[in-house]
Image: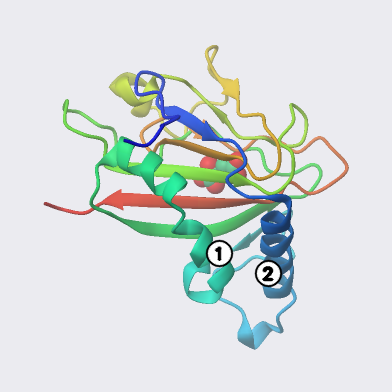
Amino acid sequence: MPQLNYDESRGFGAVDGLLSADDVASVQSECERLLLLPEPDRHLRDKVAHGTRHLFDLVERSPVIDAIVQRRALLDEVAAIIGTRFEAFEVSFRSPQPGFGAQRLHADDIPKLGHGPDTVATAIVALVDFTEHNGSTRLVPGSHRRVDLQRRSGSLDRHHDEIRLLGSAGTAFVFSGHVLHSGTRNDSTSERPALQLVWRASPS
Ligand SMILES: O=C(O)CCC(=O)C(=O)O
């Protein structure tokens, strides 16, 4: 049985050191390469010149990132949230520049009404240290068990129980997709790049 970090009652966990410093540098350079592609070679949804830069469909576009998404330590955490049968639904890169990145608290799935297993798991893999000030992800612990809060997805600017996910570059923050969470405004002087991964449980 693997040693898991996911805390079921709070709806999240962190895998410290999922990526080594070399891995972080490789992913960063892959993303920089894709951000610099000429327009005809870009993905239609990519946003390379926005305040928050995005790249999409990275499993198909980068073997380096594909290999990271397959790491056992990550997939074990996902399985603890949504069971052992799942597929990656979104593998993207999100990088708010200074002054950008604020979002409302939201869930990555519709409100969960019943007591059955969660159906969506999300991971944010930090490509720089996540600090209080550089647009680190926040979440509301336990909100995956609060339908009243999930129904307010996209409408809350803040919640008194919210916490920041802080850690070193290479940490993977893994949470139930039903947990209210969001990016925050990057008040530092550098970009805050991260991989954003979402898995869905396969229908049984
Ligand atoms: O980048 C982050 O910190 C979280 C982003 C997020 O939750 C989203 O874009 O839906």
Give the image location of residue 174, x and y in percent.
47, 38
Residue 142 relative to residue 27: left or right: left
Image height check: is 40 above or below 113? below
Q: Does residue 200 appear anywhere in the picture?
A: yes
Q: Does residue 57 appear anywhere in the picture?
A: no
Q: Marks 1 and 2: in contact by CB < 8 Å?
A: yes
Instruction: Say which amino acid is labelled 2.
Output: Glu
Residue 78 relative to residue 133: left or right: left
Callout 2 environment at 10 Å: few (<14), some (14 to 19), or many (20+)?
some
Q: Residue furthest top?
A: 160
Tag of residue 65: 1
Instruction: Say which amino acid is labelled 1.
Output: Ile
Q: Which residue is pictured at 56% across the width and 76% down the height?
A: 43
> In what quadrant of the picture does the N terminus appear?
top left
Query: Marks 2/1: CA distance?
Result: 8 Å
Ligand 1: give its quadrant: top right
Image height check: is 177 above or below 37? above
Q: Which residue is pictured at 66% across the width and 29% down the height?
A: 166
